[in-house]
Amino acid sequence: MAWFALGRVVFVATVAYVAALLRPVPVGGLPANVLFGLLLAGVVVALERPLRQTPPSRLLGALLGFISGLVIARAIEAGLFWADFADHRIEFLHGFLLIVLPYLGLIFGAKNGEWLEPLRLASLFHPVGPERRYKILDTSVIIDGRIADVCETGFIDGTLVIPQFVLKELQLVADSGDSMKRNRGRRGLDILQKIQKMASVEVTISDVDFPEVREVDLKLIELARAPGQDRHE
Protein backbone atom coordinates (compact mmCIF):
# COMPACT_ATOMS: atom_id res chain seq x y z
CA MET A 1 0.00 0.00 0.00
CA ALA A 2 2.91 2.35 0.72
CA TRP A 3 4.18 1.88 -2.83
CA PHE A 4 0.72 2.69 -4.23
CA ALA A 5 0.55 5.87 -2.13
CA LEU A 6 4.03 6.90 -3.24
CA GLY A 7 3.12 6.27 -6.85
CA ARG A 8 0.03 8.46 -6.55
CA VAL A 9 2.07 11.29 -5.04
CA VAL A 10 4.64 11.06 -7.84
CA PHE A 11 1.86 10.97 -10.45
CA VAL A 12 0.08 14.04 -9.03
CA ALA A 13 3.34 15.96 -8.74
CA THR A 14 4.31 15.06 -12.32
CA VAL A 15 0.98 16.22 -13.74
CA ALA A 16 1.18 19.47 -11.77
CA TYR A 17 4.76 20.04 -12.99
CA VAL A 18 3.82 19.41 -16.64
CA ALA A 19 0.85 21.78 -16.32
CA ALA A 20 3.12 24.45 -14.79
CA LEU A 21 5.66 23.93 -17.58
CA LEU A 22 3.31 23.92 -20.55
CA ARG A 23 0.64 26.23 -19.08
CA PRO A 24 -2.55 24.93 -20.79
CA VAL A 25 -4.64 27.53 -18.92
CA PRO A 26 -4.09 30.90 -20.64
CA VAL A 27 -5.19 33.00 -17.66
CA GLY A 28 -4.15 33.07 -14.03
CA GLY A 29 -0.46 32.42 -14.58
CA LEU A 30 1.53 29.71 -12.79
CA PRO A 31 -0.83 29.17 -9.79
CA ALA A 32 -3.85 28.60 -12.05
CA ASN A 33 -1.97 26.04 -14.17
CA VAL A 34 -0.63 24.20 -11.13
CA LEU A 35 -4.13 24.09 -9.66
CA PHE A 36 -5.48 22.82 -12.97
CA GLY A 37 -2.87 20.04 -13.00
CA LEU A 38 -3.69 19.08 -9.41
CA LEU A 39 -7.43 18.94 -10.16
CA LEU A 40 -6.85 16.87 -13.29
CA ALA A 41 -4.61 14.43 -11.41
CA GLY A 42 -7.17 14.25 -8.58
CA VAL A 43 -9.88 13.20 -11.05
CA VAL A 44 -7.64 10.44 -12.40
CA VAL A 45 -6.83 9.20 -8.88
CA ALA A 46 -10.54 9.22 -8.01
CA LEU A 47 -11.24 7.03 -11.05
CA GLU A 48 -8.50 4.61 -10.05
CA ARG A 49 -10.50 2.74 -7.36
CA PRO A 50 -13.54 1.80 -9.53
CA LEU A 51 -11.19 0.84 -12.35
CA ARG A 52 -9.23 -1.50 -10.06
CA GLN A 53 -12.49 -3.21 -9.07
CA THR A 54 -13.59 -3.64 -12.69
CA PRO A 55 -12.77 -7.01 -14.33
CA PRO A 56 -10.06 -6.74 -17.00
CA SER A 57 -12.39 -8.28 -19.58
CA ARG A 58 -14.83 -5.38 -19.16
CA LEU A 59 -12.03 -2.81 -19.46
CA LEU A 60 -10.80 -4.49 -22.63
CA GLY A 61 -14.36 -4.64 -23.96
CA ALA A 62 -14.85 -0.93 -23.25
CA LEU A 63 -11.58 -0.08 -25.03
CA LEU A 64 -12.42 -2.19 -28.08
CA GLY A 65 -15.94 -0.76 -28.17
CA PHE A 66 -14.61 2.80 -28.01
CA ILE A 67 -12.12 2.14 -30.84
CA SER A 68 -14.83 0.46 -32.94
CA GLY A 69 -17.17 3.42 -32.46
CA LEU A 70 -14.41 5.84 -33.42
CA VAL A 71 -13.57 3.84 -36.57
CA ILE A 72 -17.25 3.73 -37.60
CA ALA A 73 -17.61 7.46 -37.03
CA ARG A 74 -14.53 8.12 -39.17
CA ALA A 75 -15.87 5.79 -41.88
CA ILE A 76 -19.19 7.64 -41.97
CA GLU A 77 -17.34 10.95 -42.14
CA ALA A 78 -15.27 9.66 -45.06
CA GLY A 79 -18.43 8.44 -46.78
CA LEU A 80 -19.88 11.95 -46.62
CA PHE A 81 -17.08 13.42 -48.74
CA TRP A 82 -19.68 14.89 -51.06
CA ALA A 83 -21.27 16.96 -48.27
CA ASP A 84 -20.66 20.68 -47.89
CA PHE A 85 -18.20 20.95 -45.00
CA ALA A 86 -18.81 24.69 -44.83
CA ASP A 87 -22.36 23.97 -43.67
CA HIS A 88 -22.50 24.18 -39.87
CA ARG A 89 -25.13 21.43 -39.81
CA ILE A 90 -22.75 19.00 -41.53
CA GLU A 91 -19.96 20.09 -39.22
CA PHE A 92 -22.21 19.50 -36.20
CA LEU A 93 -23.19 16.06 -37.56
CA HIS A 94 -19.52 15.08 -37.83
CA GLY A 95 -18.83 16.21 -34.28
CA PHE A 96 -21.96 14.49 -33.00
CA LEU A 97 -20.95 11.17 -34.58
CA LEU A 98 -17.42 11.45 -33.18
CA ILE A 99 -18.90 11.83 -29.69
CA VAL A 100 -21.90 9.49 -29.77
CA LEU A 101 -20.54 6.43 -31.59
CA PRO A 102 -17.39 6.01 -29.44
CA TYR A 103 -19.54 6.56 -26.34
CA LEU A 104 -22.06 3.89 -27.39
CA GLY A 105 -19.20 1.54 -28.26
CA LEU A 106 -17.64 2.16 -24.84
CA ILE A 107 -20.91 1.35 -23.02
CA PHE A 108 -21.74 -1.68 -25.16
CA GLY A 109 -18.20 -3.07 -24.95
CA ALA A 110 -18.05 -2.67 -21.17
CA LYS A 111 -21.44 -4.34 -20.71
CA ASN A 112 -20.52 -7.35 -22.84
CA GLY A 113 -16.86 -7.55 -21.93
CA GLU A 114 -17.31 -10.93 -20.20
CA TRP A 115 -17.47 -12.52 -23.66
CA LEU A 116 -13.76 -11.76 -23.98
CA GLU A 117 -12.96 -14.16 -21.13
CA PRO A 118 -11.07 -17.25 -22.37
CA LEU A 119 -13.76 -19.71 -21.25
CA ARG A 120 -16.49 -17.71 -22.97
CA LEU A 121 -14.45 -17.47 -26.16
CA ALA A 122 -13.76 -21.21 -26.11
CA SER A 123 -17.47 -21.95 -25.70
CA LEU A 124 -18.18 -20.18 -29.01
CA PHE A 125 -16.28 -22.91 -30.86
CA HIS A 126 -17.91 -25.86 -29.12
CA PRO A 127 -20.36 -27.76 -31.32
CA VAL A 128 -23.93 -27.18 -30.26
CA GLY A 129 -25.73 -30.50 -29.96
CA PRO A 130 -29.27 -31.36 -29.05
CA GLU A 131 -30.38 -30.64 -25.52
CA ARG A 132 -29.98 -33.60 -23.20
CA ARG A 133 -32.52 -34.32 -20.52
CA TYR A 134 -31.59 -35.93 -17.21
CA LYS A 135 -33.70 -37.62 -14.55
CA ILE A 136 -32.00 -38.01 -11.20
CA LEU A 137 -33.34 -41.00 -9.27
CA ASP A 138 -33.38 -41.22 -5.49
CA THR A 139 -33.49 -44.28 -3.27
CA SER A 140 -37.24 -44.35 -2.73
CA VAL A 141 -37.99 -44.17 -6.47
CA ILE A 142 -35.68 -47.11 -7.16
CA ILE A 143 -37.10 -49.22 -4.31
CA ASP A 144 -40.68 -48.40 -5.35
CA GLY A 145 -40.08 -50.27 -8.59
CA ARG A 146 -42.60 -48.52 -10.79
CA ILE A 147 -39.81 -46.63 -12.52
CA ALA A 148 -38.82 -49.91 -14.21
CA ASP A 149 -42.35 -50.37 -15.57
CA VAL A 150 -42.34 -46.81 -16.91
CA CYS A 151 -38.97 -47.43 -18.58
CA GLU A 152 -40.33 -50.56 -20.27
CA THR A 153 -43.17 -48.56 -21.83
CA GLY A 154 -40.65 -46.29 -23.57
CA PHE A 155 -42.08 -43.06 -22.15
CA ILE A 156 -38.79 -42.15 -20.46
CA ASP A 157 -36.63 -39.92 -22.62
CA GLY A 158 -33.13 -38.72 -21.84
CA THR A 159 -30.73 -40.17 -19.30
CA LEU A 160 -31.38 -41.65 -15.88
CA VAL A 161 -28.76 -40.44 -13.40
CA ILE A 162 -27.95 -42.60 -10.36
CA PRO A 163 -25.70 -40.73 -7.91
CA GLN A 164 -23.07 -42.73 -6.03
CA PHE A 165 -24.44 -41.52 -2.69
CA VAL A 166 -27.84 -42.96 -3.61
CA LEU A 167 -26.19 -46.30 -4.39
CA LYS A 168 -24.45 -46.21 -1.01
CA GLU A 169 -27.73 -45.51 0.74
CA LEU A 170 -29.39 -48.30 -1.19
CA GLN A 171 -26.60 -50.71 -0.20
CA LEU A 172 -26.96 -49.68 3.45
CA VAL A 173 -30.66 -50.49 3.31
CA ALA A 174 -29.88 -53.85 1.67
CA ASP A 175 -27.40 -54.66 4.48
CA SER A 176 -29.77 -53.56 7.25
CA GLY A 177 -30.37 -55.81 10.23
CA ASP A 178 -34.09 -55.25 9.81
CA SER A 179 -35.40 -57.96 7.48
CA MET A 180 -38.08 -55.70 6.01
CA LYS A 181 -35.56 -52.96 5.19
CA ARG A 182 -33.11 -55.56 3.89
CA ASN A 183 -35.70 -56.96 1.49
CA ARG A 184 -36.61 -53.48 0.26
CA GLY A 185 -32.95 -52.64 -0.33
CA ARG A 186 -32.29 -55.84 -2.25
CA ARG A 187 -35.45 -55.26 -4.26
CA GLY A 188 -34.10 -51.80 -5.16
CA LEU A 189 -30.77 -53.26 -6.30
CA ASP A 190 -32.58 -55.83 -8.45
CA ILE A 191 -34.73 -53.13 -10.03
CA LEU A 192 -31.66 -51.01 -10.73
CA GLN A 193 -29.96 -53.94 -12.47
CA LYS A 194 -33.12 -54.53 -14.50
CA ILE A 195 -33.17 -50.91 -15.66
CA GLN A 196 -29.48 -50.98 -16.58
CA LYS A 197 -30.07 -53.99 -18.83
CA MET A 198 -32.79 -52.23 -20.82
CA ALA A 199 -31.46 -51.28 -24.23
CA SER A 200 -33.93 -48.40 -24.64
CA VAL A 201 -32.83 -46.61 -21.47
CA GLU A 202 -29.56 -44.76 -20.94
CA VAL A 203 -28.33 -45.00 -17.35
CA THR A 204 -25.30 -43.20 -15.96
CA ILE A 205 -23.69 -43.34 -12.52
CA SER A 206 -22.70 -39.90 -11.24
CA ASP A 207 -19.59 -39.63 -9.08
CA VAL A 208 -20.42 -36.07 -8.04
CA ASP A 209 -20.68 -35.80 -4.28
CA PHE A 210 -21.05 -33.04 -1.73
CA PRO A 211 -19.11 -34.04 1.40
CA GLU A 212 -20.20 -30.93 3.28
CA VAL A 213 -23.85 -31.99 2.90
CA ARG A 214 -24.97 -34.95 5.02
CA GLU A 215 -28.62 -35.49 4.06
CA VAL A 216 -29.11 -37.44 0.84
CA ASP A 217 -32.14 -35.34 -0.13
CA LEU A 218 -30.07 -32.17 0.11
CA LYS A 219 -27.31 -33.82 -1.92
CA LEU A 220 -29.87 -34.53 -4.64
CA ILE A 221 -30.89 -30.88 -4.69
CA GLU A 222 -27.26 -29.77 -4.96
CA LEU A 223 -26.65 -32.25 -7.78
CA ALA A 224 -29.67 -30.94 -9.68
CA ARG A 225 -28.30 -27.41 -9.32
CA ALA A 226 -24.75 -28.35 -10.32
CA PRO A 227 -23.54 -27.18 -13.76
CA GLY A 228 -22.49 -29.64 -16.41
CA GLN A 229 -25.88 -31.11 -17.30
CA ASP A 230 -28.24 -29.42 -19.71
CA ARG A 231 -31.44 -30.29 -17.93
CA HIS A 232 -32.31 -31.89 -14.59
CA GLU A 233 -35.71 -33.24 -13.69
Image: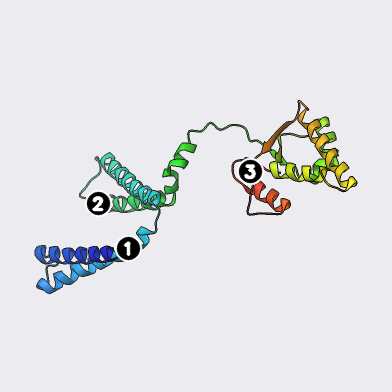
Please state if 130 lies on the left or on the right of 153 as rendered: left
**Is the residue under label 2 in contact with that under label 3 (CB below 8 Å)?**
no
Q: Residue furthest front?
A: 177
In-front residue for pair 201/39: 201
Closest to the observer: 88 or 42? Answer: 42
Of badges 1 and 2, nearer the viewer stands 1
Which amino acid, by three-letter code, is at mark 1? Leu
Q: CA distance from mark 1 to mark 2?
A: 32 Å
49 up-or-down from 76: above or below: below
Q: Identify residue for label 1.
A: 47
Tell me which numbered mark, 1 or 2, is placed earlier along the sequence: 1
Mark 1 is surrounded, within 10 Å at the Cα level, by few (under 14), some (14 to 19) or many (20 or more) other residues, namely few
Q: Is residue 186 left or right of residue 13?
A: right
Residue 24 visible in the current orientation: no
The mark that comes first in sequence, 3 or 2, is 2
- Tell me if mark 3 has few (under 14), some (14-19) or many (20+) residues whose alpha carbon lies within 10 angstroms of its own: few
Residue lying furthest right in this view?
A: 180
In the rendering, at what x and y percent does residue 181 appear?
A: 86, 46
> Regarding mark 1 in the picture, which secondary structure is present there?
helix
Residue at (68, 43) in percent of width and height: 232
Q: Amino acid at mark 2?
A: Glu
> Which of the numbered marks, if any, corresponds to residue 5?
none
- Asked if the residue at tag 2 contacts the one at tag 1, i.e. Cβ–Cβ closer than 8 Å, the answer is no
Secondary structure beneath dot 3 equals loop
Q: Which residue is the site of mark 3?
A: 208
Q: Which numbered dot is residue 91? A: 2
Q: In the image, residue 139 lies at what x, y percent?
A: 78, 45
Viewer can see residue 156: yes
